[in-house]
Amino acid sequence: MDTTIWPVSDNTTEVQHNITTGNNLQTVTLGFPKWLIGYIAYTVGVTSGSIGIIANAVVLVVLIRARRQYGSNVNTLIINQTVMDFLACCFIVISVTFYIADLLVYNGSN
């Protein structure tokens, strides 16, 4: 009998029997564990969000201080864009933190 291996992304290994041809199909897991993907996502999300928060805070302070001397409509637009980017980075850090906290909830199984 021929055995066909089909890679999938879940964490199970199961044998399925095809009734029409009589072949055994074996499903093999080739993916990463969910907790490892969660930690990688947390690391990338928090790192990029933190760097974005710091960089946008510095740009915002510089632009607000320069606005008093060199006030223009372009500076106002750049300030608005920096505020939006700053808030986006804050929400990235918050959402990644909620995501990883949901992964770490103990559900009673191993």
Image (tube, rainbow, N blue to C red):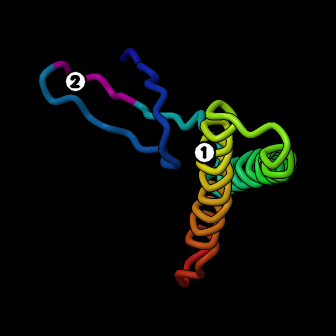
- Residue that badge 1 annotates: 80
Q: Nearer the viewer, residue 2 or 30?
A: 30
Where disc 1 sits, the SS reads: helix
What residue appears at the point 31 percent right and 37 percent down from the top-left corner? 16
* Prevailing SS of the magenta stretch: loop
Residue 24: image location, x then y, percent? 34, 28
Q: Nearer the viewer, mark 1 or mark 2?
A: 1
What residue appears at the point 53 percent right and 81 percent down from the top-left corner? 107
Query: On the rendered structure, is 84 left or right of 43?
Result: left
What amino acid does circle 1 point to?
Asn
Q: Is the Cβ of the residue at disc 1 closer than 8 Å to that at disc 2? A: no
Mark sitting earlier along the chain (1/2): 2
Q: Nearer the viewer, residue 8 or 81?
A: 81
Q: Nearer the viewer, residue 20 or 57?
A: 57
Can the viewer see residue 17 in this picture?
yes
Where disc 2 sits, the SS reads: loop
